[in-house]
Amino acid sequence: MSDDKTVNDTVELAGGDGEIKEPLCESEQQGFKPATTPEVNKTPSSRFLQVELELNAHLRGLTFREPVRYIYNPLEYAWDTHRCYVEKFCLGGQKILFLGMNPGPFGMAQTGVPFGEVRSVVDWMKITGEVGHPDDEHPKRRITGLACTQKEVSGARFWGFFRKLCGEREALLALCDTALCQAVEALGFTMVIGVGKVAEQRARRALSAAGVNVQVEGILHPSPRNPLANKGWEDVAKAKLAELGVLSMLSNM
């Protein structure tokens, strides 16, 4: 930010009529090299975070001339909360990407979450973590992180819209989470095996949040819509259960 203006605002002013006469940023590195080919065994969230780490490294090589003075990169000073957001929601299988630009001063700039209005981030998404500070802060744009009391209107509208759409689903899942925890405790299970990633991740999240001490694992979902399952689901499931020490128990029944 520069005196309450973003870098993009400054670029527009530099040309007057929108034509950029001189670049306001310089870099010793021309162009951006794409991330290396992702490893197969890495999760979608870890691959996504790796792309952002590489982007951060390139951004540090940029220098800006006057009137730009203040530079805020929430992917650095708010990395903790941003990583929590990515690891919680970037799970793979999604088909649609919503793209935004220019982190709001009371949204992502504070929380590290896109359109990250604090109440939506804390109360609905349950994002946690520490938020630091940029090297040089504008006196009118202090970073207070998840303790920020200023409302980001665009973020409240954006996430509020999706919260309304997903409200019934969230209420249903919350009831199922509670029932799962109660059933595990009542029957004394020591291991919960989710059939498919969604079930595994939901069980892990629910049981951990409730403080239920149980091992959570997962096996491949047998759905015909799953290409991997169509290549020999039994063998994959058998190998996983053997790895978990469960196959021998089933064989003796």
Image: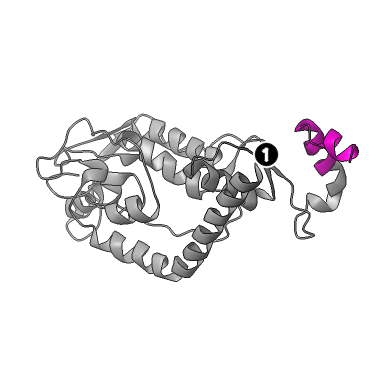
Toward the left, the furthest residue is: 139
Q: Does residue 189 appear anywhere in the picture?
A: yes
State the residue in front, 112 or 26.
112
Work out which residue is located at the far front of the displayed protein and give it.
186
Name the spot of residue 12 as percent of width and height, x first: 22, 55
**Residue 200 falls left or right of residue 251:** left
Kind of residue indicated by mark 1:
Met
Residue 188 appears left or right of 140: right
Q: Position of residue 253 (x, y in %)?
A: 89, 41
Q: Is residue 23 visible?
A: no
Query: Which class describes the residues within 10 Å of circle 1: few (<14), some (14-19), or many (20+)?
Result: some
Taking the spot 16% from the left edge, 57% from the top edge, the residue there is 16
Q: Secondary structure at mark 1?
A: strand
* The magenta stretch spans residue 211: no
Image check: 241 left or right of 45? Answer: right
Region in magenta: 236-253
**x and y percentages locating residue 193 in the rendered image:** 69, 44
At x 67%, y 39%, the residue is 191
Q: Which picture quadrant has residue 27?
A: top left
Indicate whether 159 appears above or below 181.
below
- Magenta: main secondary structure equals helix
Q: How many marks?
A: 1
Query: Which residue position holds label 1?
Result: 191
- Front-lying residue, 104 or 70: 104
Quick one: which residue is furthest to the right in this view? Answer: 252
Vertical order, 246 against 118 (above or below):
above
Residue at (48, 62) in percent of width and height: 170
Return the residue nearer the eye: 50 or 59.
50
Q: Residue at x 47, y 64 (%)?
A: 171
Residue 252, quarter of picture:
top right
